[in-house]
Image (cartoon, rainbow, N blue to C red):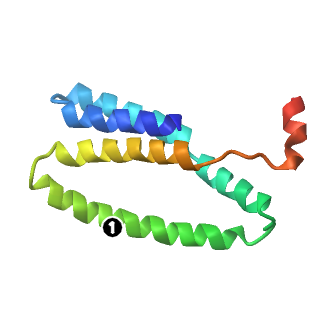
Amino acid sequence: MLSLVIQALSYFIYAFGSAWPHFVLAEVVSGVGFAFMAGSLDAWIVDRYQLAGYLDRTDFLFSRAEVSLNTAQILGAVITSWLIGFGLQLPFLLGGLVFLLALVVGWLLVEEQKPTGWSWALRL
């Protein structure tokens, strides 16, 4: 969840930045956000999948996720191209708001349940 807040912050820095140092700062903040995000969603999906009793075939999930991600990126590029016609700040503002919306949806809908086989992790 922290990664979503950091990513939203980077988009808002882009939207309101007016000089080169602002954009460098936005890239640094975005890099930190992506570092927090890297692999965490994939690990959560695998844990939930295994908790539901499916112990194999995670490759199917990730291939479907890749198709969905590619489709969303294409749609995002088209929407961004259209939004730029209204102003250069608008795509970044809406992008930041989408990250905050994802934070709210994740906070409300995602429940965290650890598989029972994690007792070893609690002892470390």
For this rendering, which residue is in front, 116 or 75? 116
> What residue is drawn where x is 53% and y is 38%?
1
Q: In this view, does 60 lie to the left or right of 70?
A: right
Q: Vertical placement of 98 versus 51: above or below?
A: above
Q: In which quarter of the image is residue 24?
A: top left
The reply to whether residue 9 is in sight is: yes
* Residue type for callout 1: Ile
Q: Is residue 88 left or right of residue 115?
A: left
Q: Which residue lies furthest to the front in this view?
A: 108
Q: Vertical placement of 62 versus 11: above or below?
A: below
Q: Vertical placement of 99 versus 47: above or below?
A: above
Q: Is residue 70 left or right of residue 48?
A: left
Q: What element carries label 1?
A: helix
For the residue carrying disc 1, how many other residues have a C-alpha within 10 Å: few (<14), some (14-19), or many (20+)? few
> What residue is drawn where x is 33% and y is 67%?
74
Q: Name the residue that disc number 1 marks.
A: 74
Q: Is residue 55 left or right of residue 23?
A: right
Looking at the picture, how far across and down is residue 15, in whole percent? 22, 37
> What residue is drawn where x is 90% and y is 30%?
123
Q: Which residue lies furthest to the left in this view?
A: 86
Looking at the picture, how far across and down is residue 14, in whole percent? 25, 36
For this rendering, which residue is in front, 100 or 36? 100
> What residue is drawn where x is 25% and y is 44%?
92
Looking at the picture, how far across and down is residue 72, in whole percent? 39, 65
